[in-house]
Image (spheres, rainbow, N blue to C red):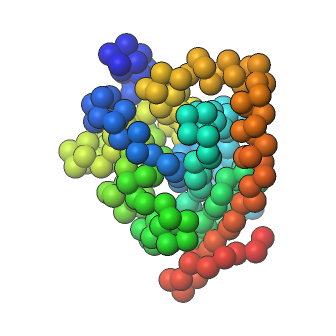
Amino acid sequence: MENIQNTFEQIGGTFVTSIQEIARKKKKIKAFLFDWDGVFNAGYKGEGASSLFAEADSMATNLIRFNYWFKHRELPFTGIITGENNQSAIQLSKRERFQAVYFKIKNKADALKDLEERYGVLPEEVCYFFDDVLDLPIAKVCGLRVLLNRTASPVFKAYMINNQLCDYITAHSGGEHGVREAGELLLSIDGSFNTVVEERLAYSENYQQYIAERNAQVPEYFIQEAGAIQPHQL
């Protein structure tokens, strides 16, 4: 574990929680949830513009899901929770077959509650990738927290560390493939990075079975209107 910690600290990552404790927490994780803006991108907005995602980060989501499947022979729950209606999030969820995307969520604790009621996903089973204040209702209660770094927010970063509201802070921001960094960290902590990459490289029977099960999933979409979360037809 020390070598892994050194590798990620050398690029600027911050372990708010010890790597041993992160490994312990990760054993309970059954779901991977992602904020969108500031996580898969830099969060830029504009009329007619949609914040994008990068293939390096998309691959990270696939590898951590395959790693979970390889260990448990079942898919983890994977979803996006965003305060906006991001078309690129829809595109990624359709292509990568995430289970759910929550749009227009003003209080993200509402989405977490809905996940538990609708899918049986408990907060302590969630690994959450996030970047800002609106994400804190989930970060306060979920099992494992990855904060995507933003060098322009040193006071916020200190607040997160002092209040133990995250477990790891990436060196790279959402616009710099921070999701990929976090994914490689989680795979390294599991000791499975080489195995997962080699299985994918060989397009092994294991990977083919995983991808068939993954691609059989049909994403579901939800929107919050007048405080209520309800299914949303695209």
| Quarter of the figure that contains the C terminus | bottom right
Whether residue 153 is visible, yes or no, is: no
Residue at left 38%, top 36%? 169
**Placement of 126 over or under 100, stated as above or below:** above
| Quarter of the figure that contains the N terminus | top left
Total marks in image: 0
Q: Where is residue 20 in the image (x, y as percent from the top left)?
A: 30, 29
**Placement of 205 over or under 32, stated as above or below:** above
Q: Position of residue 55 (x, y in %)?
A: 71, 35
Whether residue 210 is visible, yes or no, is: yes
In this view, the residue farthest toward the bottom is 226
Residue at left 32%, top 16%? 2
Q: Where is residue 110 in the image (x, y as percent from the top left)?
A: 46, 72
Residue at left 63%, top 62%? 101
Residue at left 53%, top 83%? 228
Which image quadrant for residue 205? Answer: top right
Q: Position of residue 193 (x, y in %)?
A: 56, 22
Which image quadrant for residue 218? Answer: bottom right
In this view, the residue farthest toward the left is 162
